[in-house]
Amino acid sequence: MSLHEECGIFGVYSDSQTDAARYCFYGLYALQHRGQESCGIVVNDDGVFSSHKDVGLVGEVFTKERLSAFPGGSMAVAHTRYGTTGSSSRRNCQPIEVNHQKGRLALAHNGNLSNAAVLRSGLELSGAIFHTTTDSEIIAYIITRERLRTASIEDAVSEAMKSLEGAYSLIVMSPRKLICARDPMGFRPLCYGKTPDGTYVVASESCALHAVGAKPIRDVEPGEILIFGQNGIESRREYCGKNKKSLCVFEYIYFARPDSVIDGVFVQNARVKAGEILAAQYPVDADIVTGVPDSGIDAAIGYSRASGIPYGVGLIKNKYVGRTFISPGDRMDQVKIKLSATEETVKGKRVVLIDDSIVRGTTLRGIVSLLREAGAKEIHVRVAAPPFLHPCCYGTDIDSKEHLIACRCSLKEISEMLGTDSLGYFPLERLGELTGGQGFCSACFSGRYPTEIPADTRKDRYEQKLSEIQ
C-alpha cells in the first residue's frame, strides 16, 4: 500500500470550564493514523482563543509543557493533517483561525473540495488574499464572509454550504458555539458522543470518542449541521436527503481504524468480509495466509476463515515507524525499516499475502522481496480493493493516472513486476457488501464521479515552480 490518506478532526464542547486541550490531545492521538504531517489545537477560554500548531506527530508537537500552557477552556477544536491540497508546511497547519468584526473563528476540515480552484479564483478576483495553499482556507473565508451578513454562525455555515462542492466534514468554533457539518453526500465520516461529566466531543471516527471516555451517540448525517451551545444541541437538516449518499468506500478498506464504527458499519467486519470474498473469488492451494500490517491483517483473517488455510504472522511491523507512504523518500528503503519477514513462518511455504490496495506497487514489491528472502516458496497476492484507475478529487491523494500502476500495466504485467506467483484484486461489483448496503463513492476504481470534477487535480497546483507552468 502506498496511498496518501485523510485528515482527522476533533472538537470539544462543555457548558463549563474543562481541560479541553487534554481532551483534544488524546483525541488526536487516536486519529494519528489519518495524518502524520502536522497537527494543531485551538482552545476557547471565554471567547479568548489560544492555539498551537506545528509540523510533526501529536506527541512531538504537544509536549507536557506545551499542553500545560493552554488555559482550561470550555471549547476546543483540533486537527491532524495529511494534506490533499497544499504542501506539508507550517503555514498549512490547521485548525485555521480567523479574526473578524463579529468575533473569532477556528476551523478544522477533513476532505477535499472538488470546486476549490473555481471558488478560490472567484474570491481572489473579488479581493480575497490567501495565506495558505489549502482548500480549507477557502471554506474559512466563505464562512467568515457569510458571518458578516447573517445573524448567527450556524446561518453562516449553512449559507457557505450552498457554494461548497465535494468532500468536507467540518468543525467550526466561534466564541460561544461549536458547529459541526458534513457535506450532503457524506464523503467523509463524522460522529459525536458524550463523556460521563457531560462534555460533548466530535470526531472523525468513533475510536477517538472512546479514547477520551465518551460514549458514542451517533454519526452526523450527510448534509446535517449540528450546533452545540448554551441551549443544548440543535440539528439543522436543510441539506439532508438532497443527494445520494457517497461515503468513501476506502474508509472501510483502509483509512479508518479497524475498531471504529462508521455510519453503523464496524470497520473490522468490513475488512474481514473483504477477505472472505477474495477467498471465494481467487482460491489457491497454499500453506499459510498472512497480511501486510496493519490494514491487511483483518482481510487476511477473513481469507483464512473462508479458505481453511491457516493464518500466520509472516510479517512483523516496527511499531515505532509511521506509515511508510506518508514519509518522503525511497519507499523501497523504508519497507525494510518498517517490516521484517518471519522466516520460521514462511520458509518453504506457499504464502497467500493480503494487502489492502496497490497504487504504484513499489511498496508491495519490496514486501514480496522480503518474503522471498525469508524463503517463501510461492507468493500469491490478494488485494482487498479493486485496481486504482482514476484520480480522486475528494481527499484521497491520487492526483494523476501516471502514478497508477493499473493504468499502465495488465494484471500479468503487475504480477511480474511485483514478483508474485499470482495476483487477484477485489471485484468492483461487490464493494457494496462492505458498506452495509448504503451508498458509497468508488470513483477512484470505477471512474463514476458523484460530482463535477476539476480539470486539474494535482495536490501542488498552487505551488509550482515558474519553469513548470505552461
Image: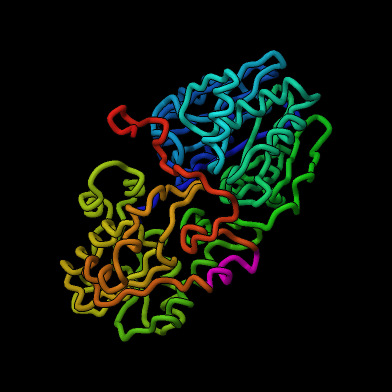
Counting every numbered tag in the picture gives 0
Magenta-colored stretch includes residue 450: no
Q: In the shown orientation, is residue 191 left or right of residue 253?
A: right
Magenta-colored stretch includes residue 433: yes
| Above or below for 166 versus 436 | above
Q: Nearer the viewer, residue 299 or 102?
A: 102
| Percent of width and height locating residue 44 | 64, 23
Quarter of the image holding residue 57?
Answer: top left
Q: In the shown orientation, is residue 367 left or right of residue 185?
A: left
User: Which residues fall within the magenta stretch?
Assistant: 430-438
In the rendered image, is residue 216 in sight? no
Q: Residue at x 35, y 31 (%)?
A: 464
- State the residue lying farthest toward the front: 470
Q: Residue at x 30, y 52 (%)?
A: 318
Colour setup of the view = rainbow
| Percent of width and height locating residue 410 | 30, 70
The N terminus - image quarter: bottom left
Q: Residue at x 27, y 74 (%)?
A: 412
The C terminus - image quarter: top left
| Percent of width and height locating residue 300 | 40, 71
In the rendered image, is residue 213 in sight? yes
| Above or below for 353 versus 85 | below
- State the residue lying farthest toward the top: 101
Q: Residue at x 32, y 43 (%)?
A: 327
| Percent of width and height locating residue 139 | 60, 32
Quarter of the image holding residue 335?
Answer: bottom left
Q: In the shown orientation, is residue 70 left or right of residue 346?
A: right
Q: Nearer the viewer, residue 463 or 110?
A: 463
Q: In the shown orientation, is residue 98 left or right of residue 350?
A: right
